[in-house]
Image (spheres, helix red, strand yellow):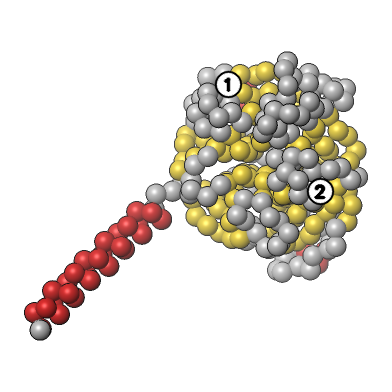
Amino acid sequence: MNRRRARWGAALLALATAAAALTLIVTGCTDVERVGRLEPKDLKESSGLAASRRNPGVFYTHNDSGGDATIFAVREDGSLAARFRLGVPNTDWEDVATDDTGNLYVADTGNNQGERKSVAVHRVREPALPAHTGGGKGKENDGEKLDVDRTWHPRFDKSPPDCEALFIHRGHAYLISKVKSGPPVMFRFPLAAEDDPAAQRVGELPLDRPVTAADLSADGKRLAVLTRGQLALFDVNNDPTTAATGRAPPRRFRLPGTQIEGVTFTPDGRVLMSAESREVYRLKE
């Protein structure tokens, strides 16, 4: 009996050791760490993420297509600082971005089925958060309205591509297409143009997975492009076109299996990501 127990004990120990090793393999196979979870219960599918240039420690996100036309201001741990309503519909919001002149942009540029004849990029002034939301578990507001002061409807050679990535740099809005096969395409249009500007085709990125978000660091030196299961970082030195013209090879980082749809740079240059399931991740560099 004692020998049988010893054998069973040894077998159980071996199984436990194997399970522990497997856990290490699973949890250690990515280049990110989980740092929080988005708190708002009405944030059903986080899509898009942008660091505030006006409110330190605050990030903006929103729901995916068909959700409320609401921008959520959250902190890195996912706690809610405030929420804001936009006076435009959320047809298929896919990304959000900020610039260095105090503006916030929303990309209503999703076109999964190819049925949309027109897409839009909206601009509002970045809000100043109430003083009580600056730290800790600030009380959320009840949805102050932000007025859209400009909307662009970029024109493409054919029907608008499905684009889930937006960033702003030196007077241009950049969009990256999401394709099921083949390399994604980078487009841009000038913000000083008319409301229906032509989208210039910049080039193809050296990626082979669907692009779900992008962001440019505040100093313009690094471009982060989020794809399914992978993050690509390009050293672009204030010229994002180098990523789509073969002049800036990417560094690639592994991501968890969950659907990550938002990426941004923090003010100190770290990379932060959000998943549709509301987890917040930070890149380990």
Q: Which corner quadrant of the image does residue 21 belong to?
A: bottom left
Check whether the beta carbons of the residues at disc 1 and disc 2 lie within 8 A of each other: no
Q: Residue at x 82, y 21 (%)?
A: 197
Q: What amino acid is found at the position of numbered circle 2 in the picture?
A: Ala
In the depicted structure, whether residue 70 falls above or below residue 227: below
* Whole-number angstrom distance, CA of label 1 to CA of label 2: 31 Å
**Whole-percent x, y for residue 85 in the image:** 85, 51
23 to the left or right of 92: left
Q: Residue at x 67, y 18 (%)?
A: 201
Q: Residue at x 76, y 37 (%)?
A: 108
Q: Mark 2 sits on what residue? A: 69
Q: Is residue 222 visible?
A: no
Label 1 Cα crowd, 10 Å radius (few <14 / some 14-19 / many 20+)? some
Judged from this view, the residue extending furthest toward the bottom is 1
**Whole-percent x, y for residue 64 in the image:** 70, 46
Residue situated in front as seen by the camera: 243 or 230: 230
Q: Earlier in the sequence, mark 1 or mark 2?
A: 2
Q: Give the quadrant of the N terminus.
A: bottom left
Q: Which mark is residue 204?
A: 1
Q: Helix, strand, or loop for circle 1? A: strand
Q: In the rendered picture of this protein, how many numbered marks are placed on residues?
A: 2
